[in-house]
Image (cartoon, grey):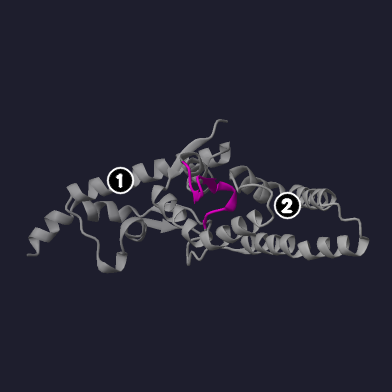
Amino acid sequence: MERILLHENKDLLFEICKDLKQYLPQLEQVKKTYENLQLGNFNDDILKQIVRSGTGQIEKQFNESLNDQVEKAGISNIILRDNILKGSENLIFEFLEKIRELKRFKPETYSRKNYLKLNVISFQNGTFYLSDENKTQILENECRIYIENEKEKELFDNLQNFIEAYNKVTGNLKELDFKFSYEHGKGVTAIANGFLWLELDNTYSIRPETLKFATTYKEMSLRFK
């Protein structure tokens, strides 16, 4: 069956988008340490590569670039060459550590379970931001509830019928000026306590005497005033 949108929470989208502010220090550190590798300017493709594919390609590029620079410098002394290469390892190690810190980071959301994920953050013109496409993705992944199969559809339809029946009964009681006592409770609970028996098999049946009581409630109230 085709999915049916049941609920969309745009307030939740707004709250999730605010999580970006907590990510910014870690993201800026990743950007800074990447640019220290001198492989070019940080961009959105690099961000997506880091988040989705890992750093293997970047590490390979760094090592190839470093070796090329050593070759171009004409350094033939093996010891000197190794010292230069080892000295440059700190740059890639620092970058990789900032990546690990970023991927371990989770924004503080208190009781909110849904939070901003790294794969929906974009980068453009030196700024980390959430594009309209990112927000649509967040809305779809975090803020929408769908009916996705026949069992859910059946339960939804039955609940809708239940609500419709409850509203009709409430309307009947309002027309009769019927008032529940405090002990009955409110809403569905009041109707269950006031008009129904809970049977041994966990199903409900109507308490016959309550129908007469409800339909004569207004008359009896006036009589005893």
Q: Residues within 10 Å of mark 2 (few under 14, many from 20)?
A: some
| Residue assigned mark 2 | 55
From the viewer's perspective, is 42 left or right of 190?
right
Q: Residue at x 67, y 46 (%)?
A: 49
Q: Residue furthest top?
A: 2
Of residues 194 and 65, the one drawn nearer to the viewer in this rendering = 65
The x and y percentages for residue 105 are 60, 63
What segment is highlighted magenta in the picture?
Answer: 114-131
Q: Is residue 120 above or below residue 133?
A: below
* Residue 155 visible in image: no
The x and y percentages for residue 205 are 42, 52
Q: Residues within 10 Å of mark 1 (few under 14, many from 20)?
A: some
The x and y percentages for residue 68 are 81, 48
Q: CA distance from mark 1 to mark 2?
A: 59 Å
* Residue 192 visible in image: yes
Of residues 62 and 149, the one drawn nearer to the viewer in this rendering = 62
| Residue assigned mark 1 | 167
Q: Is residue 54 above or below residue 95?
A: above
The residue type indicated by label 1 comes to Asn
Of residues 41 and 6, the one drawn nearer to the viewer in this rendering = 41
